[in-house]
Amino acid sequence: MTVMFVTTFLMALVIIFVWQKSILVASIFLLFFWVIEGVYLSAAFLKVHQGGWVPLVLSFFFLIVMYVWHYGIRRKYKYDLHNKVSLKWLLGLGPSLGIVRVPGIGLIYSELATGIPAIFTHFVTNLPAFHKVLVFVCVKSVPVPHVSPEERFLIGRACPRPYRMYRCIVRYGYKDIKKDDG
């Protein structure tokens, strides 16, 4: 009910700023629907003491879980952003990265669209071998409805040619269906 209440208010803002209608039209819309939604909302509040508190507690619990998840993802991205591997350090290792390079293609997923993620130093120092070709894959959602297939993949070098390290940025619009078969 509260979501409907807030959505009606946001719709009034759309009427004013997007549709360029008068404030009077938006106020009439807002008043009409808020009266109807206010009746439903007050009826829901009257049922809280009779067991209506359970959905409130569950929604608060899930709100906390989603907030903690979002906070952790944001902190991880900031950490990766501030602790990127310097290209100077990587070039100092040489084209073989100081380890055995085996045939094949290695994919390393990262949220970073530029630079080498910090986790890569962990791979280099702890793994005895790595693939000859390394691709840093980044999947991004862009603020357009659809991204055409020709513009979906942005591929470029992450290091000079002998290192065989590339970056692939996969872009999806907010209405695109994400497929893993590409």
Image (cartoon, helix red, strand yellow):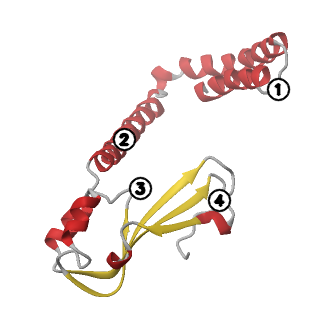
Can you identify the residue that label 4 sits on? 176
Q: CA distance from mark 4 to mark 2?
A: 27 Å
Which one is in front in this view, the residue at disc 4 or the one at disc 2? 4
Can you identify the residue that label 2 sits on? 65
- SS for tag 3? loop
Can you identify the residue that label 3 sits on? 114
Residues at discs 1 and 2 in contact (Cβ within 8 Å):
no
Instruction: Give, as a three-letter code, the residue at label 3.
Output: Thr
In the rendered image, the vertical position of residue 113 relative to residue 54, given as above or below: below
Tell which circle, 4 or 2, labels the residue nearer the N-terminal end. 2
User: Picture quarter containing residue 127?
Assistant: bottom left
Which one is in front in this view, the residue at disc 4 or the one at disc 3? 3
Relative placement, left or right, of 113 versus 101 is: right
Tell which circle, 4 or 3, labels the residue nearer the N-terminal end. 3
**Residue that appears at 24% across and 65% down:** 90
- SS for tag 1? loop
Tell which circle, 4 or 1, labels the residue nearer the N-terminal end. 1
Q: Position of residue 26 (x, y in %)?
A: 79, 16
The quadrant in which the N terminus is found is top right
Front-lying residue, 170 or 175: 170
User: Picture quarter containing residue 35?
Assistant: top right
Q: CA distance from mark 3 to mark 2?
A: 30 Å
Relative placement, left or right, of 154 versus 157 is: right
Tell which circle, 1 or 3, labels the residue nearer the N-terminal end. 1
Front-lying residue, 27 or 180: 180
Which one is in front in this view, the residue at disc 1 or the one at disc 2? 1
Tell which circle, 1 or 2, labels the residue nearer the N-terminal end. 1
Q: Residues within 10 Å of mark 3 (few under 14, many from 20)?
A: some
Can you identify the residue that label 1 sits on? 19
The residue furthest bottom is 103
